[in-house]
Amino acid sequence: MKKLFIETLGCAMNVRDSEHMIAELNQKEPYELTEELSEADLIIINTCSVREKPVAKLFSEIGVFNKRKKEGAKIGVAGCTASHLGKDIIKRAPSVDFVIGARNVSKITQVVDKKHAVEVDTDFDESTYAFGEYRTNPFKAMVNISIGCDKSCTFCIVPATRGDEISIPSDLLVQEITKAVNTGAKEVMLLGQNVNNYGRRFGGTDEKMDFTGLLRKISKIDGLERIRFTSPHPLHMDDAFIEEFASNPKICKQIHVPLQSGSTELLKAMKRGYTKENFINRCEKIRALCPEATISSDIIVGFPGESDADFADTMDVLEKVRFEQLFSFKYSPRPHTEAAEFEAQIDNTLSGARLTKLQARHTEILDEIMDAQLGTVHHVYFDELKSNGRVSGRSDDGKLVFVEGSEELLGQIVPVKIVKTSRGALDGVLI
Ligand code: 5AD
Ligand code: SF4
C-alpha cells in the first residue's frame, strides 16, 4: 500500500481539508498514513498564510523534505498559501509536483498524478460536493457548514485565499452528521470562517435558514450529544443566538468571541463592524445567560496606528471579560489586505512588548480560573488513550481533563471530580 505523509498547519478548517483530501485519495487508491517522511510516496503540506512566518518557513521545509524524501515520492502544497501563491510556488521550488488551493481540495485526485498541476480557483464552489468519509478522531466529527468568508477585515488574507462565503444546505449537513453519529461520533464541531453568518448565501438552493435555526435543526439528531462550533463573529451574536447557545443542552458551553482589538477606533480601521462597548455587551450577555460558559478570544497587537491608549483598551477588555483562553498575535502585514498599505506600521519591539504584557496578564487570569476548578465536577467526553494508563477528554466547557483509566472509557461521557489543576489541563477522578 502507498504511504501518505500529510502535515497540517493553521486552523480547524485546514484540519478538515486534510481529512477531505485523505478521504478522496483513499477512494481512488488506499493510502496508509505515515509520520515518517522518508517512507512516504506522497507528501502533502497543507499550509496557512494568516501570518507571514509560516509562509517563509514553507520554502525551507520544501527543501528539507525534497532531500529526505524517498526516490520518486511526490510533494504537493495545499491550503491557503497554495491559494495565494499558486504557480509561483513551483517557479520558486520546482521540486513541488502539484499545488492545490484551500477551495479546491475536492480536486486532489485529479492533480496528484499530473506533473506541476496547479488548481487554485477561489471562485470554485465545492459547497455541495459529496466528499468521501474520513475522520482522524472516531469519537468526534468535524463538519464544514460554509466555505469562504464574506468579511473584509483589513488585516486578514483569508477572503483572498478561500473566496466568497457559501453555506452548505442544512439537509446535507443533517445527513452528514447523522452518518457520523451512526459510526460512533457523539460530538460534532461545526466549522466555518464565520459560522454565525450561516445562510447568507447557498449554492444551488434558495433555503432560508440562519445559524440559530441550524443549531436547532442539528440538535434534533438522535444520538448526537454535543455540538461545538468555530468560529463565530461577535457582530452576528444577536440575542436569539446567545439564548439558543445558553438554553440548548446539546450545545457545549464554550464559545470563541474573537476581539482582535479593544479600541473602537482600531476596530473601525480593521472593519470589524462592532465597538468596544458592543463587544463587552455581547460577552456580558453570554455570562449572564450562561455563567458556566467559557469564552475564548483572538487578539492582534501592533495593528497599524495602535497607540498606548488603544492598547490600554485591549487590556481593559481582557480585565472585564476575563477570557478563559486567549490566542494572541503580533500583527503581520499580509498581501492582498488593506492594512498592509496603512502608513502607521508599528515598530516590532513595541508590538513585542505589548504582546508580552498582554500574555503575562492573561496567564495570571488563567491561573486563577484553573485553580478555581479544584473540587468541581465536569462531564468529560473521553476520546484519547495515553500510554501511561491515563485517558483524556474534554469537559463540556472545553477543558482538557485526564483520569486514570483504560479504553473502556473511550467514547463515554462521564462525570469527573477535579483533584488537581494546572494551567493547561485538569486531573480528575471518576465519580
Ligand atoms: N496578523 C496577525 N494576526 C492575524 N490574524 C489574522 N490575520 C492576521 C494578521 N495579518 C489572527 C486573527 C484571527 C486569527 C485566526 O489570526 O486574530 O482571528
Ligand atoms: Fe479573517 Fe475576518 Fe474572515 Fe475571520 S471573519 S477569516 S478575521 S476576514
Image (cartoon, rainbow, N blue to C red):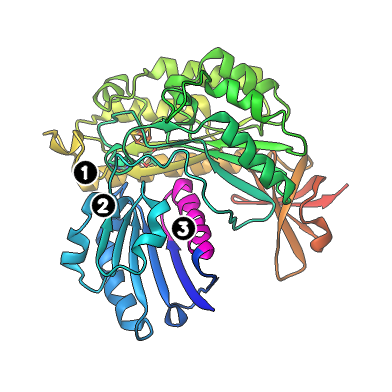
User: Which numbered disc, 2 or 3, marks the residue closer to the eye?
Assistant: 3
User: Which numbered disc, 3 or 1, marks the residue closer to the eye?
Assistant: 3
Instruction: Check whether the beta carbons of the residues at disc 3 and disc 1 lie within 8 A of each other.
Output: no
Q: Is residue 386 left or right of residue 37?
A: right
Distance between mark 1 and mark 2 Cα atoms: 7 Å
Of label 1 and label 2, which has the lower sequence position? 2
Q: Which residue is mark 1?
A: 333
Residue 12 in the magenta stretch? The answer is: yes
Q: Secondary structure at mark 1?
A: loop
Task: State the predominant SS element of the stretch in magenta.
Answer: helix
The one of 302 and 251 positioned closer to us in this rendering: 251
Q: Which residue is mark 3?
A: 21
Instruction: Indicate the position of residue 309 as horizontal and vertical percent values.
Output: 28, 25
Of the numbered discs in the image, which one, if any, rests on residue 52? 2
Q: Secondary structure at mark 3?
A: helix
| Residue sitting at the far right | 431
Mark 1 close to ligand 1, CB under 8 Å:
yes
Distance between mark 3 and mark 1 Cα atoms: 30 Å
User: Callout 1 environment at 10 Å: few (<14), some (14 to 19), or many (20+)?
Assistant: many
The vertical placement of 45 against 275, above or below, is below
Mark 2 close to ligand 1, CB under 8 Å:
yes
The vertical placement of 138 against 42, above or below, is above
Instruction: Indicate the position of residue 55 as horizontal and vertical percent values.
Output: 27, 57
The quarter of the displayed image where residue 253 is located:
top right
Region rendered in magenta? 8-27
The one of 385 and 186 positioned closer to us in this rendering: 186
Instruction: Indicate the position of residue 156 as horizontal and vertical percent values.
Output: 29, 38
